[in-house]
Image: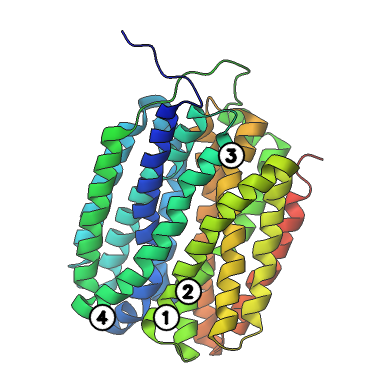
Amino acid sequence: MRAPAPVDSARGWGMVAAAFAGMFASFGIAYSFGAFLEPMAEEFGAGRGATSAFFALTSLTYFGLGALSGVAVDRYGPRRVLLVGALALGAGLAATSRAGELWIGLVTYGLGVGIGVACAYVPMVAVVGGWFERRRTLAIGVAVTGIGLGTLTVAPLAALLIDEVGWRTTHLLLGGAGAAVLLVCAAVVTRPPVQTGPAALTLGEAVRNRDYRRLYLASGLLSVALFVPFVHLPGYAVAAGADQVAAAALVGVIGAASTAGRLVLGVVAARTGALRAFQGCFLTMGASFALWLLGGGYGLLLAFAVVLGVGYGGFVALGPAVVAERFGTTRLGGLLGVLYTSAGLGSAVGAPLAGVTVDATGSYAPAVLGCLVLGLVAYLVTLTVGR
């Protein structure tokens, strides 16, 4: 019988590749929703607030179910979890493509894409974290660049497809492609080797831990603001005079900048420590909304997307490293999954509330100002971790 591969081995980099592909497909699809917002709102005769509920339910589902998928990967392994995600993603988008009423599409899209992302994200981050020790921050950083590159690629691609074949057929095409990618990932991925050392905190111990609770609060506050641009920035750009594809490309720019942020801030974290670099990501994201608030032309929106993306990339890459460093790796899936429910709750509130605010006031400024304040408050909360 062949001995299992050790941590920090070539086998681990195969898991990084699988994680990259799964996140590229699932998050690329989820974060392309801004391209669908206007055509779907027009067809269903709904306002931005109601249509934004598609994204809100999706993000609530994938972050909320991350608690279950994280525990499931600890118990059953990643392969079964990814198979469930592939089925949900393909079936959910196929059903959305045939929805005749808004509420039907809301359920099928939210559950399908939400379950797909939940099964691809937390489990794969936990698997990569378990396969590495010395190079954990780098490995996770490379894996989650799939989120940024997927956003960069799929958001403008979705806009082009919508122009050519309509939003219904685009959902169908994306669902089939995303499900196929997750099936391939399921065929490749394996459990990480068992590591020696101190046992990780149980979930019960974690929720009673002061630092874990503060990380939860900070992530929740930030997430109220963080996901607003993914839904509303394209619409704002169109209102400011940009064409549909250029507007959708702003979400792609966030993804591209997040890729750079994940890699660069991973190097920074090696010098400053993961927690300090993580805190810097909160400050960067919160302060970035000042650029959007200034208004102006497409160039300023581009700058906002870049700054937000850099901070967001580090936030995604360093969060798992901070949790693993402070609370252990043997139950990393469950620990991350529960922590990410905070992001689910925040994102479920932020995008619809911003949409309702824009519809009610006729201006994006109040919503963007709220995002700025919440982001900076979240940063202040992270400064209390470890003290």
Distance from the alpha carbon under mark 2 to that under mark 1: 7 Å
Assess whether mark 3 and mark 4 are in contact (beta carbons under 8 angstroms).
no
Q: Tell me the distance, in whole angstroms, between the alpha carbons under discs 3 and 2.
A: 27 Å
Q: Earlier in the sequence, mark 4 or mark 3?
A: 3
Q: Which residue is mark 2?
A: 250
Which residue is identified by label 4? 163
Q: Position of residue 41 (x, y in %)?
A: 34, 80
Which label sits in the foreground, 4 or 3? 3
Sequence-wise, the earlier of marks 2 and 4 is 4
Find numbered disc 3 in the image and state the secondary structure of the residue it sits on.
Answer: helix
Image location of residue 385, percent across then percent down: 75, 43
Labelled pair 2, 1 in contact (Cβ < 8 Å): yes
The residue under the point 53% across, 32% down is: 332
Q: Are marks 3 and 2 in contact (CB under 8 Å)?
A: no
Q: Is residue 21 left or right of residue 266?
A: left
Circle 1 is placed at which residue position? 246
Instruction: Say which amino acid is labelled 4.
Output: Asp
Q: Which residue is mark 3?
A: 137
For the residue carrying disc 2, how many other residues have a C-alpha within 10 Å: few (<14), some (14-19), or many (20+)? many
Q: Which residue does the image show at 47% across and 74% down from the upper left? A: 250
**Residue found at the far top of this picture:** 1
As measured in the structure, the alpha-carbon distance from the residue carrying label 3 to the one carrying label 1 is 33 Å
Position of residue 34 relative to residue 340, above or below, is below
Per the model, the C-alpha gap separating discs 1 and 4 is 13 Å
